[in-house]
Image: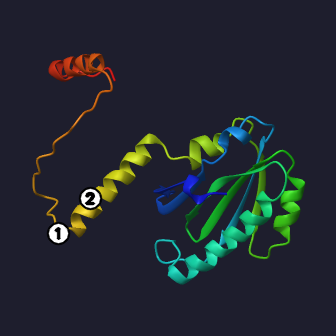
Amino acid sequence: MDMANWQNYRSQVNGMPAVFTANIEDLDVYHGKHLSKVVQFTVPYQGDEDGLPNEDEYEKLINRLFKILAQLTALPNVFFAGHFICNHQAKMHFYCEHDALLKETLQQLDFVSEINVQNDPNWDTYFDFLLASPLEMKLNATEEILSMLNSKGRNLSDTYLIEHTFHFDEEEKMFPFMDELTLGTSVF
């Protein structure tokens, strides 16, 4: 499993800061292939006042998550959908066809709790909760830009000129775009 194919982003869950990871690798291989159950469970950890783990606790937590990941993805017809870290617990989500072997494996781990299985034939948990929405992605990108500007000593209350460059593969595609800019309306 290649971590480069994981989508990571920051968000909030019930007003608490959260860090999400969604697996986007081999989605087409597993989605729609009778994996209609989602197995969800928690791995508690000691967190700071925001509910997130400190550096030492984070390393311990990640080792536990990777141990679970290695054991469960070795089972047949199992897809690691993702996890989120929030409020002193990591919550992991795996899609499967048959949940008995996953539950049996998880019950052998003393650091796993709150094992729950739900029918989710449309993968709503994955698409509507774990996967970042376009708004989440924009908010995270904006946060990163502001943080970078701040770290470079820029005053965020100053006004800055921003130049935009647009590239069109074909000249014909440029004219409708220019018309929209001239009219001040958008149909994109």
Q: What residue is rendered at 22% in x and 66% in y?
A: 150
Spot occupied by residue 24 in the image (x, y as percentages of width and height): 60, 47
> From what the image shows, is residue 55 above or below residue 2?
below
The answer for how far apart the CA atoms under marks 1 and 2 are is 11 Å
Residue 163 relative to residue 1: left or right: left
> Looking at the picture, how far across and down is residue 182, in whole percent?
15, 20
Q: Residues within 10 Å of mark 2 (few under 14, many from 20)?
A: some
Q: What residue is rendered at 13% in x and 58% in y?
A: 157
Q: Please name the amino acid that badge 2 sits on.
A: Leu
Q: Quadrant of the N terminus?
A: bottom right
Task: Say whether residue 93 is left or right of residue 98.
Answer: left
Which residue is at the front of the view, 177 or 109?
A: 177
Tell me which label, 1 or 2, sits earlier in the chain: 2
Vertical placement of residue 140 versus 16, above or below: above
State the residue at coordinates (37%, 46%).
138
Q: Is residue 136 positioned above or below 2 on the image?
A: above
In this view, the residue in front, 43 or 2, is 2
Which corner quadrant of the image does residue 40 belong to? bottom right
Q: Amino acid at mark 1?
A: Gly
The residue that mark 1 highlights is 153
Residue at 55%, 46% (x, y): give it.
131
Which residue in the protein does label 2 denote?
Answer: 146
Q: Which residue is at the front of the view, 179 or 175? A: 175
At numbered mark 1, what does the secondary structure look like: helix, strand or loop?
loop
Question: Residue 88 appears at what percent x and percent y?
Answer: 58, 72
Q: Is residue 21 above or below residue 30?
A: below
